[in-house]
């Protein structure tokens, strides 16, 4: 049985007079200990997916339909009390900005002990021992001293390590990391990524990594979902998606990276912008920006089909593929 | 520029109506009721010469024999005087209309003066910074450490003694506007300075500096328009405060003379008769004052919520 | 190599920010005694750079390395603590605002955050007309409007959108408008401070292409500040790597990417997440970037460097010219302790 199974999940936001669809019938599975990347640009719905999985959607947003089965139980139907038992305990979330998660007026130790004692029957000294072990696991030097420090006394990279230590405190089955390294510098980012990868592998923790950075996804995950305008448009093994993307958007995204073009040459850009949630085009949401667009793309939403090694939601994927083969033969 | 704005003019109102502010207004019954009441009071008082059956400033229309008639719904009323008459025999309804007009006028003009002083000082302090900022803000601190009423009482008492009450009464309205206006400018200056400090860090100000624009242009054309929301909010509250200040001063006998009563002096003049049974001379203008101040404050509350920077992403 | 006269010449530029403002803040209690103590942030430390006409010099580094401060010093938004900035042969760092005016038309800046760099209360038309009118008071309204429409078309923004306000546009479109605003005065030199890092990947490509086009069509010279090395490789002709306010390595882009010499440059290059390489082999650095308050006397990178020795602790390395034209400030490179 898979650890997490999302079925036809739709999330809507209540606006003044109507509702807008932020997530449109997304489905995916995550096996135990698997690392999944969710890639997309801002407005694609990737962060909302993370919030929906944690049952953390706030007021204007709500789950409209669909199921989120975590170890067989539907999270979307759970009460707050049930959810609190799962959150932190079996599922943990890491946010982009460490200061959002860490309470600035409590010491690191207080925050870790509080989390532990809320979920487990432990004495304070036992909880502190566990906290020190976890801090050591994330390679924090002199962990016992860190317990008495406040978040603002630590550097950005150190804070993100502590966030990871807190996420791992209760040995969760699943970590959802929403842009965990975007706020960090490249050299620090590389360290944190390596650490997260190592911890997930040794502890057999499932990871959902939400990011806009294809390089990060490529190095961290086994499978990848590509999102666009609230839909999953391509899903498959990360290697295959990066090396041989099938959806025109994924292709465009990878080709737009500067390293895909010779220095000084024009980059292969995707024209236009991601549509706003209030104005998602009919049919395929990517159709106005797509170079392979046909009439039926503008009227009919594409179904997800299996193509070569990946699942892709595109009407023209066959033609696109034959075009590419022709190009290769030439 | 001007020719450009003309073709978008017709849609301006519908734009405001459909904007976030328009929407939050439509969804807020308290704000709608407050605005309606405020507009009714304001329009009626400014049309006082047209509406009022008597002119309380005209001694020829006042007959001391008519004094202390109760309002219509009380026994012994005279059908001529809807809300009764005061101790001098003036029609209370007319006097309240004229008085409200005076109170509003003083309140709005005083706030205008506060705004001009406070906004310029706040802009300069925030934008220029350094020594000038410290100097201006210490001035504001000193000003704020005296209560408005205390400053006003001392100033008005001294002027009254200097010019004699005859001349003072003649120019009382200007003195009141000046003293209330000058006493409260630090409120504006502080608010504006805080916003300017926040706006100054934004890149559009840097961009204007890189384009070589001068400090005056940057302050007036770029920073000021982006600091307007808190100015609007504070203005409503300040109008209410100024009306109360004026009423308090008049009540203490330092404001408008009894011959040209504002709401405050009307309440004050009726106060002597409250125990002889003529409660209406104090009570009715009192209710008008409370309602007026309340609706302005309620509007201010709504405006503050509507312009909340969390909702408002300019 | 006979270099042409550089357009921009920065000599020994330094910028220190005082942390404690005012007399009272400088007083500290130390061991029961009241001592006056000033703390300073050394944001930029003895930097010398030249930009020749037509070049695109990229300044890279991590947060806190002083790259944005360099940009703001050149743009005249900050005044240097010491050192000189020359533009087109004339010294510009000590000029008054009026004396800078003719230069404002030649040198423009593009900012990082397109959501903050346009005045939210001005329509696009007003925002674009303002600099044209200010710098060319003799132009008629029609000429100004033509000029603005030209620039808008050049950056791919429909001139009929002029009546709209910035919040009606997406981030990428706003950055186009910000670029258009800089181009309205026909500059020859553009300082771009992280112009694409706030944008989405597909939009980054659009804006980068726009800047490349402008470079070719208008013969622009760029100083491009960024933290993204893949952008540097694509956009820059020369690269300066900054660490804690000092230049570690300055060389042609191709040379730098083929043969990085400074240990920090090597670590930085190895840390970029690659698309194809499954098993990254990145050089781990000890610790994190120290704060630039009261810098150590030696090499700024010494605390994190795997090759550091006692000389690195005590003596600051000077930039040394390498055989392939790169300037590298590192004792280990100078002594040949790093092989390769």
Image: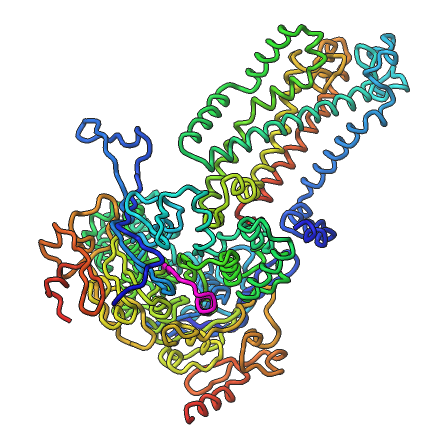
Residue ranking furthest to the bottom = A329
Closer-to-camera residue (B100/B116):
B116
Q: Is residue A14 visible?
A: yes
Closer-to-camera residue (C114/C272):
C114
Q: How many marks?
A: 0
Instruction: Residue A285 in the image: state x and y as whole percent.
Output: 56, 73
Is B242 left or right of C273, judged from the image as shown?
Answer: right
Instruction: Residue A130 in the image: state x and y as whole percent.
Output: 24, 55
The structure residue drawn at horizontal position 75% and vertical position 25%, both measured from the top left corner, is B101
The answer to whether residue B117 is above or below residue A60 is above
Is B260 left or right of C294, judged from the image as shown?
Answer: right
Is A328 left or right of B228, judged from the image as shown?
Answer: left
Instruction: Identify the main secondary structure in magenta.
Output: helix
Q: Does the magenta-highlighted stretch encompass residue C215?
A: yes
The structure residue drawn at horizontal position 42% and vertical position 68%, both measured from the top left corner, is A70
Figure quadrant of residue A88: bottom left
Instruction: Residue C288 in the image: state x and y as whole percent.
Output: 24, 55
Segment colored magenta: C207-225
Instruction: Residue C54 in the image: state x and y as whole percent.
Output: 38, 65
Q: Is residue A46 visible?
A: no
Figure quadrant of residue C145: bottom right
The structure residue drawn at horizontal position 30% and vertical position 39%, both measured from the top left corner, is C18
State the colouring used for the structure image.
rainbow
Q: Does the magenta-highlighted stretch encompass residue C112?
A: no
The answer to whether residue B82 is above or below residue B217 is above
Figure quadrant of residue B45: top right
């Amino acid at each position: 049985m898979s650890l997490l199974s999302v079925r036809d999940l739709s999330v809507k936001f209540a606006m003044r007079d109507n509702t807008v669809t932020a997530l449109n019938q997304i489905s995916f599975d995550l096996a135990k200990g698997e690392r999944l990347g969710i890639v997309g640009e801002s407005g694609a719905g990737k962060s909302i997916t993370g919030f929906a999985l944690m049952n953390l959607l706030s007021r204007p947003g709500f789950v409209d339909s669909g199921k989120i089965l975590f170890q067989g139980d539907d999270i979307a139907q759970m009460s707050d009390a049930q959810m609190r038992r799962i959150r932190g305990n079996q599922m943990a979330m890491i946010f982009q900005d460490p200061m959002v998660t860490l309470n600035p007026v409590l010491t690191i130790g207080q925050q870790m002990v509080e989390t532990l004692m809320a979920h487990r029957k432990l004495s304070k000294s036992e909880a502190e021992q566990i906290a020190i072990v976890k801090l050591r696991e994330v390679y924090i030097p002199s962990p016992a001293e860190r317990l008495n420090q406040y978040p603002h006394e630590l550097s950005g990279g150190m804070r993100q390590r502590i966030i990871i230590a807190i996420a791992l405190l209760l040995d969760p089955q699943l970590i959802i990391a929403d842009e965990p390294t975007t706020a960090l510098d490249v050299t620090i980012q590389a360290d944190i990524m390596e650490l997260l990868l190592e911890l997930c592998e040794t502890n057999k923790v499932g990871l959902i990594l939400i990011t806009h950075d294809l390089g990060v996804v490529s190095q961290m995950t086994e499978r990848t979902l590509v999102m666009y305008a609230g839909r999953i448009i391509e899903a498959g093994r990360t290697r295959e998606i990066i090396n041989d993307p099938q959806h025109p958007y994924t292709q465009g995204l990878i080709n737009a990276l500067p390293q895909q073009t010779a220095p000084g040459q024009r980059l292969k850009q995707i024209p236009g912008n991601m549509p706003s949630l209030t104005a998602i085009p009919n049919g395929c949401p990517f159709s106005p920006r797509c170079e392979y667009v046909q009439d039926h793309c503008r009227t009919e939403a594409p179904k997800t089909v299996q193509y070569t090694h990946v699942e892709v939601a595109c009407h023209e994927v066959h033609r696109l593929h034959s075009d590419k083969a022709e190009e290769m033969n030439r | 520029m001007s020719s450009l704005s003309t073709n978008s003019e017709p849609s301006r109102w519908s734009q405001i109506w459909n904007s976030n502010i328009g929407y939050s207004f439509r969804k807020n019954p308290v704000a709608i009721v407050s605005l309606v009441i405020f507009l009714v009071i304001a329009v009626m008082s400014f049309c006082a010469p047209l509406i009022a059956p008597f002119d309380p400033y005209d001694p020829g229309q006042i007959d001391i024999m008519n004094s202390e008639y109760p309002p219509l719904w009380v026994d012994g009323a005279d059908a001529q005087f809807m809300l009764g008459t005061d101790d001098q025999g003036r029609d209370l309804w007319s006097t309240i209309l004229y008085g409200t007009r005076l109170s509003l006028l003083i309140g709005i003009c005083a706030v205008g003066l506060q705004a001009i002083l406070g906004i310029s000082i706040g802009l300069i302090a925030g934008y220029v910074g350094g020594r000038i900022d410290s100097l201006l803000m210490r001035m504001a601190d000193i000003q704020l450490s005296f209560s408005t009423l205390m400053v006003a009482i001392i100033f008005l008492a001294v002027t009254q003694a200097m010019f004699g009450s005859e001349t003072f009464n003649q120019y009382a309205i200007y003195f009141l506007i000046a003293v209330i206006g000058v006493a409260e400018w630090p409120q504006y200056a502080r608010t504006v300075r805080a916003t300017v400090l926040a706006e100054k860090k934004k890149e559009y100000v840097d961009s204007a500096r890189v384009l070589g624009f001068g400090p005056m242009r940057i302050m007036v054309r770029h920073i000021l328009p982006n600091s307007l929301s808190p100015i609007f909010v504070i203005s409503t509250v300040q109008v209410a405060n100024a009306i109360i200040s004026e009423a308090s001063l008049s009540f203490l006998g330092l404001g408008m003379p009894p011959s040209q009563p504002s709401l405050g002096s009307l309440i004050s003049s009726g106060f002597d008769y409250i125990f002889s049974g003529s409660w209406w001379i104090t009570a009715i203008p009192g209710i008008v004052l409370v309602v007026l101040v309340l609706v302005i404050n309620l509007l201010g509350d709504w405006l503050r919520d509507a312009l909340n920077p969390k909702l408002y992403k300019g | 190599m006979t270099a042409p006269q550089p357009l921009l010449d920065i000599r020994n530029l330094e910028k220190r920010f005082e942390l404690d403002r005012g007399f009272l803040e400088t007083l500290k209690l130390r061991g029961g005694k009241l001592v006056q103590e000033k703390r300073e942030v050394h944001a930029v430390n003895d930097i010398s750079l030249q930009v020749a006409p037509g070049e695109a010099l990229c300044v890279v580094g991590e947060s806190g390395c002083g790259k944005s401060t360099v940009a703001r010093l050149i743009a005249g938004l900050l005044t240097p603590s010491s050192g000189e900035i020359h533009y087109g042969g004339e010294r510009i760092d000590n000029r008054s605002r009026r004396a800078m005016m003719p230069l404002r038309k030649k040198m423009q800046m593009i900012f990082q955050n397109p959501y903050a760099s346009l005045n939210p209360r001005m329509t696009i038309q007003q925002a674009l007309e303002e600099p044209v009118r200010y710098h060319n008071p003799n132009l008629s309204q029609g000429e100004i409007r033509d000029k603005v429409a030209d620039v808008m078309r050049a950056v791919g923004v429909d001139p009929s959108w002029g009546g709209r306000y910035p919040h009606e546009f997406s981030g990428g479109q706003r950055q186009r408008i910000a670029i258009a605003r800089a181009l309205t005065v026909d500059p020859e030199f553009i300082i771009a401070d992280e112009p694409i890092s706030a944008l989405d990947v597909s939009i980054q490509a659009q804006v980068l292409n726009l800047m490349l086009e402008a470079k070719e069509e208008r013969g622009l010279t760029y100083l491009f500040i960024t933290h993204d090395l893949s952008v540097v490789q694509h956009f820059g002709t020369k690269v300066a790597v900054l660490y804690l306010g000092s230049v570690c390595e300055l060389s042609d882009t191709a040379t730098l990417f083929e043969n990085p010499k400074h240990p920090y440059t090597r670590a930085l290059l190895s840390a970029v997440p690659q698309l194809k390489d499954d098993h990254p082999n990145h050089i781990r650095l000890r610790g994190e970037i120290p704060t630039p308050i009261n810098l150590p006397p030696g090499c700024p990178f010494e605390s994190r460097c795997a090759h550091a020795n006692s000389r690195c602790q005590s003596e600051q390395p000077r930039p040394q010219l390498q055989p392939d034209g790169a300037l590298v400030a590192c004792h280990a490179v100078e002594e040949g302790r790093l092989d390769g």
